[in-house]
Image: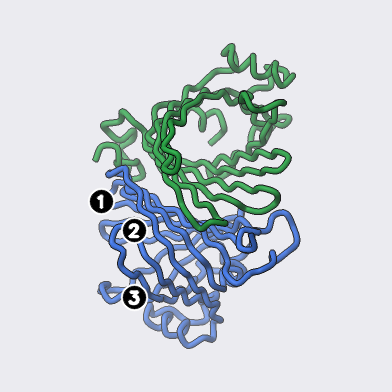
Chain colours: A green, B blue
Amino acid sequence: MDIQTFFEQSAGRWFSQRTSHHLAFKQSESGKSQLTIEFLSVTDPAVIALCNQYEIDGSQALCGARVSWDGTMEWDEEKHEGSTVIVPVADGKHSTEGKLLREMGYAEKAPVAGRYVMGSDGALTLITEYDTMYSEERIWFASPNLRLRTSILKRFGGFSMASFCSEIRLGVTQAATPTAATAQAPAE
Amino acid sequence: MDIQTFFEQSAGRWFSQRTSHHLAFKQSESGKSQLTIEFLSVTDPAVIALCNQYEIDGSQALCGARVSWDGTMEWDEEKHEGSTVIVPVADGKHSTEGKLLREMGYAEKAPVAGRYVMGSDGALTLITEYDTMYSEERIWFASPNLRLRTSILKRFGGFSMASFCSEIRLGVTQAATPTAATAQAPAE
């Protein structure tokens, strides 16, 4: 699978169950959210604007996505909602690895581009490094309608958190393809 | 990493945090356990006995492990403890893929051998198929002292559960190797 196909397959509305294992505390925290992912073509104004922000030639962008979320986590019970745009930019000719541009948040002073690696097993790995923090996320499809994500977070060189999300596509009443490998959970 | 190295690196005592996402119910359940993994050589009587049980020539076994667990899950609050022996047997000359023999439980009538695939990325995938159930587990090391596991369970062709375990090596007061990639969570 190439990264464009991965982004296309990610488009839609998802019900996401998230669990974070706080490693030092040996405690876990759960959350639920609704995720909306919109596929953006390279000619989308949001993709062009993000490339400009990072001073990257827009013709190098492979595609884009607008990701919106709306959910709650157990410990703070506050609403977590937000939206961002992400754009993968290949290293040279090969699109299996490259930069991942991300819309800056309010708290960030400078744009920090992450890295992406599209694995031969169809899993997408996203790596983000800040001064004192390192995050590595792995996202893959168990089926077209079930997407899984794990992430590990390091702070000051030590692992602090391991998280897991299972994401079920919403609005699907029938399996997308009539094979045994297709998630039937949404229809059950 | 070959499968013998993976088993050797798994040996030890681990604190395991487990979360199961019940997909149809959209509910999650947490648990904690202590896991003890003992590496077994091909000459170990338990490895030889398991090969005999499956009518497999003992010289085909690559290694073995005795896995013991002792923990609780949130919903039933009962003690879950047990122990099993597993033995990987290569397909032909290549040890990257093969059968995974497992000690039979009391409830099982016939031995069911699973499959293992040792990925080029260092992740071990275990697949078990029963009549109405299919389970696929992926296990990998984030560092020598932090092991992660995800598993998906299908019943009657539909996904019913997605689980995640983070496992921290116990009894480690210092990082095993002095690199940034080493889990420091146990020492924090």
The spot of residue B161 in percent (x, y) is 34, 50
Residue B108 occupies quadrant? bottom left
Residue B126 occupies quadrant? bottom left
Q: Which residue is mark 3?
A: B104
Q: Secondary structure at mark 1?
A: loop
Question: Which residue is more in the foreground, A17 or B65?
Answer: A17
Q: Nearer the viewer, mark 2 or mark 1?
A: 2
Q: Amino acid at mark 3?
A: Met
Q: Secondary structure at mark 2?
A: loop
* Residue B94 can be seen in this image: no
Label 1: how many residues lie within 10 Å, few (<14), some (14-19) or many (20+)? few
Q: Which residue is mark 2?
A: B74
Q: Which residue is mark 1?
A: B156
In this view, the residue farthest toward the bottom is B45
Q: Amino acid at mark 1?
A: Phe
Q: Amino acid at mark 2?
A: Glu
Question: Which residue is more in the foreground, A66 or B56?
Answer: A66
Question: How many numbered badges does the structure rendering display?
Answer: 3
Residue drawn at point x = 26 percent, y = 31 percent: A173
The spot of residue A165 in percent (x, y) is 45, 43
Question: Which residue is more in the foreground, B134 or A153?
Answer: A153
Rounded to the nearest whole Å, what is the CA distance between mark 2 and mark 1?
26 Å
Q: Chain of mark 2?
A: B
